């Protein structure tokens, strides 16, 4: 888990650089509340204090990164308690949860505080920080119609100097941290690769078949929470499949659902729902992708006749 | 193809596996010494699966070195012989490291003993022929091996004459001599390849003749150049091929060895003979040569005594039935840092709590581990990181099997192919949560209701 925190460091730097105190506020609130929630729930369950495994810190960071910079403090606080309590402890603690805890927390506050989480909440008119006075790129694209891609947007999308959720805007930072995770094997590389490839393929097909859309393949890859989701949210080992084949399917599923929601849902974005939906499928995917043992599936024999290594 | 690294480093043969620190240098340069005669040995009457031997001696009866003291009773069984000149005692019972309760025949040394250099010369030393094996008929070889009680000395201790007997309809064309000693610390096979290569090769040729094979391949890992050179020298006048394999644990497992050497995969639940191959360990080959050419039954074996917890690591030629405690004493005793004694290798062996337990034919090592070597993180919940899946050489999902076995959910464990586990220990070694996966699976395999 410590590796995940290290991997999140570039995202943290980018978030603070882009959103300044807005980002700091969300991160401090979520981190503090997640740790507090973990401590309280561990005590209630009479378990050993589990703050040392850093999983609550990771949940707090990811939850903060997925919130709008403008969200009031209580949104992060309620989200944190929902993430740790409903998302994790209710299932039996670390390793037992079906859904990604941070995304459970975010889904909870999205329903509780719809106005603080909706597309319009991202815009803070008259703020001294320029970046939060404009609509998020994906929201802008939804209303742009058939104007064609705005290539000048690509660089800001890549480095992150656009409006959006606290930690999602910089594709560069997510890539850096994400590659570190994959290299350290704290995240499985199949999931981000499958997810990004699916997003690119669907976006490419849309470009090729459909009318001129303001978002090109590259806009889709660098915009919104795709990068953050691919490397840090979908790769949560607890709620993603165990086998290589399962992870390819899982990543591709998240990518396809993201594109489906971007194209047809009322929301500008759908990484959270996509991940939660695929999390729900994970037990099924695991069951369907039990690997074939070396030498095929087993005939009935007394188990001792298999030879151990000398 | 389960991780970038695994994929890039993917060698010939099996997927998964790992590179635990070998720690072979502790004993690799210690040439094989003959353990000075123990005062008492207890020869177990069952050292492998199958039926226990029927004792042939009465209490207080005098026995001679090499005399059969227990006769095999089933098809899968091998007789046991007295490793000493002495007097038999009252049959007793011991608990072997693997948890089995088996009968033993104690023998107290009496009278003159052959020992030291003379014993080595009698069993494995001296000269061994390059050819002239044609004068032994396959049936004769098999019968001599069977009477000598030769079993697989790599660990499983499967009776060798049963393994080599041709089965109608399942022709065998290759005999592989397994010199892949992939377990950390163990150097018994390594030393044997350096000090008795001609015995090994003569035994391999005899075994090959018995099994009716066309090719004999010696398989050794690439981290043992001295052993490879020694074997190549001894093989110059013989029709023997060599396969130098990548060092990766568990390369020496039959199911991992065959894909690497021949590109053949043993079907689950099957044996190497199903794909036309038979595999024997180098120690077994040496025992075959001694049994056929010198009519010496299997009464001694080479054992590595190593680990940071032992004062003087060594490779010893030891009578079967010697209490483990004698080995520790001979090697200078245990250091203060010693915390655990393991019979076998550290990956697949069994920790033992009683040093009076006797050595069996299948035990290649006695490892005395120091505190640093056994430290393990406190067990934390499985977060399904999948490392165990990455390293499993059988392509299983160890965490699912182990956690199902822990709660006796045999249906779930069966769905994930528990029976295919070879108990190599890679999963437990790799688990960052400190879950004793291999232990849980091994227990599960022992406790699960048998399929019929």
Image: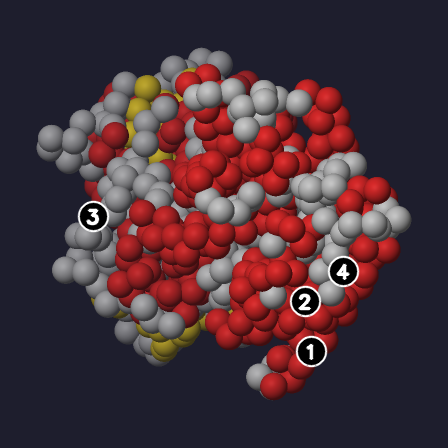
Dot 2 falls on which chain?
A
Distance between mark 4 and mark 2 Cα atoms: 9 Å
Q: Which residue is mark 3?
A: A299
Chain assignment, label 3: A
Asked if the residue at tag 3 contacts the one at tag 2, i.e. Cβ–Cβ closer than 8 Å, the answer is no
The residue where tag 1 is placed is A39
Q: Alpha-carbon distance for marks 4 and 3?
A: 56 Å
Left-right relation of A86 to A1: left
> What residue did someone put label 4 on?
A26
Image x and y of residue A290, in percent = 34, 47
- Circle 3 Cα neighbour tier, 10 Å, few/some/many (<14 / 14–19 / ≥20): some
> Residue at coordinates 35% horizontally, 35% vertically from top-left?
B279
- The lab-note entry on whether marks 2 and 3 share a chain reads yes
Callout 1: helix, strand or loop?
helix
Camera-side mark, 1 or 3: 1
Give the labeled residue for mark 2: A75
Q: Are marks 1 and 3 on the same chain?
A: yes
- SS assignment at label 3: loop
Which circle, 2 or 3, is nearer the viewer?
2
């Amino acid at each position: 888990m410590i590796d995940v925190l290290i991997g999140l460091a570039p995202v943290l730097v980018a978030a603070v650089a882009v959103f300044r105190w807005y980002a700091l506020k969300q991160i401090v609130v979520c981190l503090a509340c997640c740790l507090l929630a973990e401590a309280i729930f561990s005590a209630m369950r009479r378990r050993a204090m589990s703050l040392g495994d850093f999983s609550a810190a990771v949940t707090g960071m990811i939850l903060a990164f997925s919130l709008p910079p403008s969200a009031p403090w209580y949104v992060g606080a309620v989200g944190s308690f929902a993430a740790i309590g409903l998302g994790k402890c209710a299932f039996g603690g670390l390793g037992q949860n079906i859904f990604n805890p941070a995304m459970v927390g975010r889904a909870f506050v999205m329903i509780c505080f719809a106005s603080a989480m909706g597309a319009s909440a991202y815009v803070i008119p008259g703020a001294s920080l320029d970046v939060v006075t404009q609509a998020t790129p994906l929201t802008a694209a939804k209303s742009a119609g058939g104007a064609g891609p705005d290539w000048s947007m690509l660089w800001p999308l890549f480095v992150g100097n656009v409006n959006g959720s606290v930690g999602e805007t910089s594709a560069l930072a997510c890539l850096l941290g994400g590659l570190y995770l994959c290299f350290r094997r704290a995240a499985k590389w199949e999931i981000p690769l499958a997810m990004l490839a699916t997003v690119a393929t669907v976006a490419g097909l849309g470009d090729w078949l459909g009318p001129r859309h303001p978002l090109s393949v590259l806009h889709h890859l660098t915009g919104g929470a795709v990068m953050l989701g691919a490397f840090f949210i979908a790769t949560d080992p607890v709620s993603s499949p165990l086998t290589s084949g399962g992870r390819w399917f899982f990543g591709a599923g998240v990518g396809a659902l993201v594109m489906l929601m971007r194209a047809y849902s009322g929301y500008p974005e759908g990484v959270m729902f996509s991940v939660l939906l695929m999390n729900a499928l994970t037990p099924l995917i695991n069951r369907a992708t039990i690997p074939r043992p070396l030498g095929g599936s087993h005939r009935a024999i007394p188990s001792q006749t298999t030879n151990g290594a000398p | 193809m389960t991780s970038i690294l695994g994929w890039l480093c993917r060698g010939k043969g099996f997927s998964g596996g790992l590179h635990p620190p070998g720690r072979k240098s502790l004993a690799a340069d210690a040439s094989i010494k003959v353990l000075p005669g123990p005062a008492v040995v207890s020869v177990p009457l069952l050292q492998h699966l199958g039926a226990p031997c029927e004792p042939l001696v009465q209490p207080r009866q005098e026995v001679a070195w090499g005399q059969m003291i227990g006769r095999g009773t089933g098809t899968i069984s091998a007789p046991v012989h007295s490793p000493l000149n002495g007097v038999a005692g009252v049959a007793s019972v011991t608990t072997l490291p693997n948890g089995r309760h088996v009968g033993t025949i104690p023998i107290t040394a009496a009278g003159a003993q052959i020992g030291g250099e003379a014993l080595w010369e009698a069993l494995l030393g001296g000269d061994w022929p390059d050819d002239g094996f044609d004068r032994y008929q396959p049936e004769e070889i098999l019968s001599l091996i069977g009477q000598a009680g030769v079993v697989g000395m790599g660990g499983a201790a499967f009776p060798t004459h049963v393994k080599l007997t041709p089965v109608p309809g399942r022709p065998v064309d290759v005999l592989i001599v397994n010199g892949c000693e992939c377990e950390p610390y163990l150097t018994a096979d390594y030393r044997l390849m350096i000090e008795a290569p001609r015995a090994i090769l003569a035994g391999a040729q005899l075994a090959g003749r018995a099994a009716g094979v066309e090719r004999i391949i010696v398989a050794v890992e690439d981290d043992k150049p001295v052993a490879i050179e020694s074997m190549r020298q001894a093989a110059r006048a013989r029709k023997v091929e060599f396969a130098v394999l990548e060092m990766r644990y568990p390369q020496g497992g039959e199911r991992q060895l065959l894909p690497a050497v021949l590109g053949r995969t043993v079907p689950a639940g099957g044996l190497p003979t199903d794909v036309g191959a038979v595999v024997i360990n180098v120690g077994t080959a040496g025992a075959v040569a001694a049994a056929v050419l010198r009519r010496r039954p299997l009464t001694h074996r080479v054992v590595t005594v190593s680990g940071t917890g032992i004062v003087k690591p060594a490779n010893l030629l030891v009578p079967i039935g010697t209490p483990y405690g004698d080995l520790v004493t001979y090697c200078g005793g245990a250091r203060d840092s010693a915390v655990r004694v393991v019979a076998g290798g550290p990956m697949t062996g069994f920790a033992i709590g009683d040093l009076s337990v006797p050595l069996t034919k299948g035990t290649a090592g006695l490892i005395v581990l120091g505190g640093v070597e056994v430290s393990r993180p406190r067990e934390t919940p499985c977060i399904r990181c999948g490392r165990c899946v990455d390293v499993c050489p059988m392509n299983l999902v160890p965490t699912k099997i182990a956690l199902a076995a822990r709660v006796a959910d045999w249906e779930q464990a069966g769905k994930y192919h528990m029976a295919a586990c070879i108990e190599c220990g890679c999963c437990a070694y790799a688990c960052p949560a400190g879950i004793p996966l291999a232990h849980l699976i091994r227990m599960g395999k022992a406790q699960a209701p048998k399929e019929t």
